[in-house]
Image (spheres, rainbow, N blue to C red):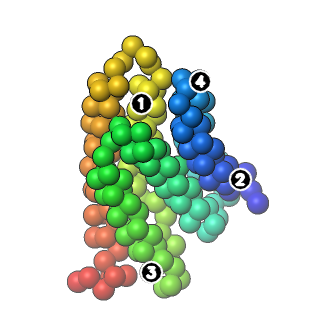
Amino acid sequence: MNLPNKLTLLRVVLAPVFMAFMTIDALWAKWIALIIFAAASLTDMLDGKIARSRGLITTFGKFADPLADKMLTTAALIMFTYKGIIGPWPIFIVLIREFAVSGIRLAAAAEGEVIAASFWGKFKTVTQMIAIIAGILIMCLPMISQHVGAVITGILIWISVLFTIISGIEYIVKNRKLLKLK
């Protein structure tokens, strides 16, 4: 297994560890959760750069990398919902998009094609990760009231949801032939 794929698997492992720290109701645990999430987010950038620069792009990486991203960001959205910071709609919309794109990827795989992440898909992931990191950071700053923090985090999450919708529409339009949507 090459280094980029190991970094991808590390992100998968870090998702439940992140969730565990988010469930602890202590400031120190939120800081650790923030560090874990930020480090895991960096592995997303690193695995792709390393894979491209060293010619280590694999079919496994093309499938596993977006799944690892989904696990990490979904874990955070679940925790934000659990903590009452955001409502269920953002996570519902994100999951619908993720299921749709995964279905398209499965249809492509059945045809012998591998669909790599698009620009909009990557941009969606970056905006989600930035919104989540900002949201956790706000939770770590006691000078920001819970209500104000939830409003700011909610706005950032909804901005990322907008890009989630855009990237989902792009995947469907670009790959409609696989779905027989003409």
> What residue does disc 2 label?
6
Q: Is residue 170 above or below residue 45?
A: below
Badge 4: how crowded within 10 Å, few (<14), some, or many (20+)?
few
Q: Which residue is mark 1?
A: 134
- Say what secondary structure mark 4 lies in: helix
Nearer to us of marks 4 and 3 is 4
Say which residue label 3 marks: 107
Q: Amino acid at mark 2?
A: Lys
Residues under numbered marks 2 and 4 in contact, where contact means CB atoms less than 8 Å apart: no
Q: Look at the numbered discs 4 and 3 and tell me whether their residues touch, using CB distance below 8 Å.
A: no
Which residue position is annotated with label 4? 28
Q: Nearer the viewer, mark 4 or mark 1?
A: 4
Cα separation, mark 4 vs mark 1, equals 16 Å
Note whether residue 46 is visible.
Answer: no
Q: Is residue 179 above or below residue 151?
A: below
Query: Percent from the top left, x then y, of residue 34?
Result: 54, 32
Between marks 1 and 2, how big is the CA–CA gap? Answer: 27 Å
* Horizontal arrangement in the rendering, residue 9 relative to residue 101 (left or right): right
Q: Disc 3 or 1, which lies upstream in sequence?
A: 3
Q: Rounded to the nearest whole Å, what is the CA distance between mark 2 and mark 4?
A: 28 Å
Q: Earlier in the sequence, mark 3 or mark 2?
A: 2
In this view, the residue in front, 149 or 51, is 149
Which of the image's four quarters has the C terminus? bottom left
Q: Judge the density around disc 2: few (<14), some (14-19), many (≥20) Cα neighbours within 10 Å.
A: some
Quarter of the image where one finds residue 171 = bottom left
